[in-house]
Image (tube, rainbow, N blue to C red):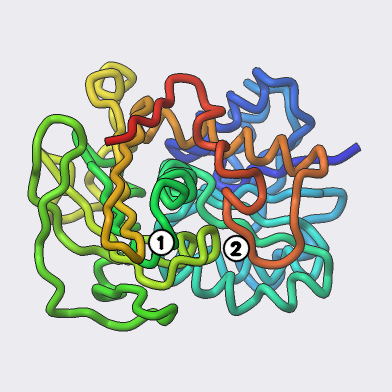
Amino acid sequence: MSTLLIYGATGYTGRMAAERAKTLGLRFEIAGRDHARLAVLAAHLGVPFRVFDADADAAGALSGISVLLNFAGPFAHTAEPLMRACIKARVDYLDITAEINVYRLAEQLGTEAASHQVMLLPGVGWDVVPTDSLAVHVAKRVEKPFALSIALQVPGSMSRGSAMSVSEIIGAGVMARVDGELIATPDATLRHFDFGDGPVLCAPLSFGDLVTGWHSTGIPNIAMFVHISGDAFPEGDLSTLPDGPTPEEREKHRARAVVEAMGVDRVIARSVIETVNGYSYTPLAAVEAARRVLEGERLSGFATPAKAFGGGFAESIEGTLITDF
């Protein structure tokens, strides 16, 4: 039987994913670096656990595993060694990152992964599953689409792990996809987007959609933006932040994203996707993605959620709705 390994299972989102996997009755184990915390969680879930670092020796710890689902961020530190370990061990790799450089790495490793019949599928959480599906959806609403604008709304408080990952994204610099190529766009300007309650100002930022949108739709020009409200992006020492928002805080803030597609006739179509809070959505989508891969719904090489599971994957998560404007 195929077995899932959830790496980083004792973290904020990893624990929710492990509990979801248990609820669904999946065959899985948990892993990470902290033996004591893993032992407690493994006893609670009634599953085996493995202790190993995300390093060059990780392949040796993947015996008997079919799919690795990585929750250990910042992914700039863990994705490359775990991807390479998965290729060596012939294990499919999934993670929940939004960090664009991880997607670029997966692209680069795609040919090697394909030669080993391994899938590299980063971004099976809030970013990029909803926006990837939405990009595929809205692209069908215009004639010969040639440009996409994608915007995420980030309300409420941010987890410590997410804040650290966003720091990695900011450090990558502002980029856009122009005529199929990723280029630096340090002079990109702010733009207004309407998530359903009127236009709000959004800042350019380089999320993984600049890679996935291109692969999923073939549209050569893509720009990415984010609207951060309230205390969503903290400052100062990020290590002092709490693990993440409480269930009550998650209930207060549903997640939304908007995608605009422009056709050759300059007609623009806009669609909005709304779902449960991103921190609630991520473990649901990630475990559903892993379940599908375990059952053989997979590709070899670099993949996107929409390519692997179809453009309707985001809406398969309960509480998700797409509205066209």
x and y, in percent, of residue 166 in the image: 29, 58
Location of the C terminus by quadrant is top left
- Toward which corner of the image does residue 264 lie, by quadrant? bottom left
What amino acid does circle 1 point to? Pro
Relative height, residue 207 to residue 96 (above, below): below
Q: Residue at x 81, y 40 (%)?
A: 3
Q: Residues within 10 Å of mark 1 (few under 14, many from 20)?
A: many
x and y, in percent, of residue 289 in the image: 64, 40
Q: Secondary structure at mark 2?
A: loop
For disc 2, the marked residue is 54
Circles 2 and 1 in contact, beta carbons < 8 Å: no
Residue furthest out toward the front: 265
Labels 2 and 1: the sequence-earlier one: 2
Q: Nearer the viewer, residue 198 or 304?
A: 198
Judged left or right of residue 92, residue 222 is left
Q: Residue at x 44, y 66 (%)?
A: 219
Q: Is residue 127 visible?
A: no
**Label 2 – label 1 distance at C-alpha:** 40 Å
Judged left or right of residue 81, residue 167 is left
For disc 1, the marked residue is 145
Residue furthest out toward the right: 1
x and y, in percent, of residue 172 in the image: 31, 74
What amino acid does circle 2 point to? Ala
Q: Nearer the viewer, mark 2 or mark 1?
A: 1
Location of the N terminus by quadrant is top right
Relative height, residue 285 to residue 77 (above, below): above
x and y, in percent, of residue 146 in the image: 38, 67
Q: Residues within 10 Å of mark 2 (few under 14, many from 20)?
A: many
